[in-house]
Image (cartoon, rainbow, N blue to C red):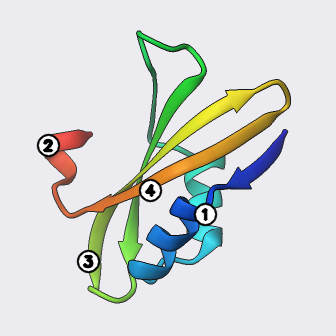
């Protein structure tokens, strides 16, 4: 499956100083996957990772849309509130 980062997702990665490899790892090895009830094409991938800049664990959430053989990462959320969202 082809992975595409939207311009917005790339902007979020840059703002949070997160490498693309971290986001791709979240897709390949998620801690949790949720599919939208309203739109089966919208998928949320969640992964706990060690934030190198802040020096502690964070939760990375990737909101994606699946279209045929493509998975587009629409936006990325990074939070320290792991237990709230996982």
Q: CA distance from mark 1 to mark 4?
A: 11 Å
Return the mark for residue 69.
none
Q: Quick check: 31 left or right of 28?
A: left
Q: Earlier in the sequence, mark 1 or mark 3?
A: 1
Label 2 crowd bin: few (<14), some (14–19), many (20+), radius 10 Å: few
Question: In the rendered image, which residue does mark 2 sit on?
Answer: 84
Q: Residue 23: x and y, percent?
A: 57, 61
Label 4 crowd bin: few (<14), some (14–19), many (20+), radius 10 Å: many
Q: CA distance from mark 2 to mark 3?
A: 16 Å
Label 3 crowd bin: few (<14), some (14–19), many (20+), radius 10 Å: few
Residue drawn 50% across and 72% down?
11
Between label 4 and label 3, give the one nearer the viewer: 4
Residue closest to the far front: 7
Q: Earlier in the sequence, mark 4 or mark 2?
A: 4
Q: Earlier in the sequence, mark 2 or mark 1?
A: 1
Q: Residue 45: x and y, percent?
A: 49, 40
- Where, by quadrant of the figure, is residue 52 drawn? bottom left
Q: Quick check: 34 left or right of 41?
A: left
Question: In the rendered image, which residue does mark 3 sit on?
Answer: 56
Question: In the rendered image, which residue does mark 1 sit on?
Answer: 7
Residue drawn 80% across and 37% down?
70
Q: Earlier in the sequence, mark 1 or mark 4?
A: 1
- Where, by quadrant of the figure, is residue 81 drawn? bottom left
Label 3 sits on a secondary structure element that is strand
Residue drawn 53% across and 61% down?
9
Q: Nearer the viewer, residue 69 or 46?
A: 69
Question: In the rendered image, which residue does mark 4 sit on?
Answer: 76
Between label 1 and label 4, give the one nearer the viewer: 1
Between label 1 and label 3, give the one nearer the viewer: 1
């Amino acid at each position: 499956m082809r992975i595409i980062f939207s311009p917005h997702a790339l902007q979020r990665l840059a703002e949070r100083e997160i490498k693309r490899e971290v986001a791709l790892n979240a897709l390949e090895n998620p801690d949790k996957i949720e599919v939208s009830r309203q739109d089966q094409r919208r998928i949320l991938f969640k992964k706990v990772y060690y934030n190198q800049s802040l020096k502690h664990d964070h939760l990375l959430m990737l909101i994606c849309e699946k279209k045929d053989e493509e998975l587009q990462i629409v936006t990325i959320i990074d939070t320290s509130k792991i237990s709230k969202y996982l």
